[in-house]
């Protein structure tokens, strides 16, 4: 009951399950939006979130576990936290708690243990969580001698969301900021702009649309204007034998930005 909490205005509010989807008709669709409103009102919030629900690691979790994550929390919620505590527990200890009915009701335990909560999955989640906390600490420029910024170039292909999440994780590790640019060369691509702008906001990145007929030149100019130390691009496919003798967009970006590190991300849909 957000209205009641705001009226009472406590010094601290405890709000569990940050990624939770609220019931229809409530003040906000998502619980993290409730938390944002409480914080905007000057109320301190202590909350919890499972690592698999953080937007920037969604693709990692799905690739490791094979389970699609439906509910996510924007990375800006972590970036805005004064303190992040990683609550560590050994995989087998967590599975033991589940068997005892401390987490799920008895009728759901076996299904959970045989799916997401397998030992291998839990070990992977533990590693991802540790990395996430380390990256969040590095996000503070005060602990990085030379922060390095990242530019991610997307085109609307199937790997664009993967590229964006990769770029954000790289920027976190380097203590820098992430800029996502989308080169729009056809009207059809413009319909995807809003979706990528929204995802960039969820990830805590800036977003820009580059108009033009030469994507490579547009990306090179944007990287130089932004002073990007790293550029993340997707692997380019060669559609004909003639393409083998022509430089790809990635080739031209590498040649045009000798001062930057270029990260070419392989496709996972092959």
Image (cartoon, helix red, strand yellow):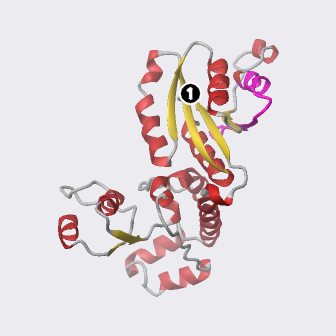
Nearest to the observer: residue 79 or residue 166:
79
User: Is 196 displayed left or right of 33 in the figure?
Assistant: right
* 12 relative to 77, above or below: below
**Quadrant holding the C terminus:** top right
- Percent from the top left, x then y, of residue 98? 48, 81
* 50 relative to 184, above or below: below
Q: Mark 1 points at which residue?
A: 155
- Percent from the top left, x then y, of residue 116? 53, 66
Residue occupying the point 47% across, 22% down: 189
Boundaries of the magenta span: 250-270
Residue 164, picture quadrant: top right
Q: Tag 1, which secondary structure?
A: loop
Nearest to the observer: residue 101 or residue 218:
218
**14 inside magenta stretch:** no
**Count of numbered tags:** 1
Residue 104, picture quadrant: bottom left
């Amino acid at each position: 009951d957000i209205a009641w909490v705001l009226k009472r205005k406590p010094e601290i509010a405890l709000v569990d399950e940050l990624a939770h989807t609220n019931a229809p008709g409530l003040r906000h669709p998502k619980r993290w939006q409730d938390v944002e409103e409480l914080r905007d009102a000057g109320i301190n919030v202590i909350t919890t979130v499972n690592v698999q629900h953080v937007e920037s690691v969604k693709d990692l979790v799905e690739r490791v576990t094979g389970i699609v994550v439906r509910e996510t929390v924007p990375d800006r919620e972590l970036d805005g936290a004064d303190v992040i505590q990683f609550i560590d527990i050994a995989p087998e200890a967590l599975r033991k708690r589940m068997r005892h009915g401390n987490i799920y009701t008895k009728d759901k335990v076996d299904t959970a243990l045989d799916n997401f909560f397998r030992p291998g999955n839990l070990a992977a989640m533990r590693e991802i969580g540790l990395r996430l906390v380390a990256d969040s600490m590095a996000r503070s420029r005060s602990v990085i001698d030379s922060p390095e910024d990242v530019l991610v170039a997307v085109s609307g292909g199937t790997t664009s969301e993967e590229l964006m999440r990769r770029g954000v994780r790289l920027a976190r590790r380097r203590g820098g900021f992430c800029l996502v640019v989308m080169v729009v060369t056809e009207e059809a691509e413009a319909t995807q702009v809003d979706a990528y702008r929204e995802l960039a906001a969820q990830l805590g990145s800036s977003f820009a649309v580059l108009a033009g007929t030469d994507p490579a030149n547009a990306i090179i100019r944007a990287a130089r204007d932004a002073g990007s130390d790293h550029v993340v691009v997707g692997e380019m496919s060669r559609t004909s034998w003639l393409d083998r003798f022509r430089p790809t967009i990635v080739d031209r970006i590498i040649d045009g930005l000798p001062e930057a590190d270029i990260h070419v991300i392989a496709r996972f849909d092959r």
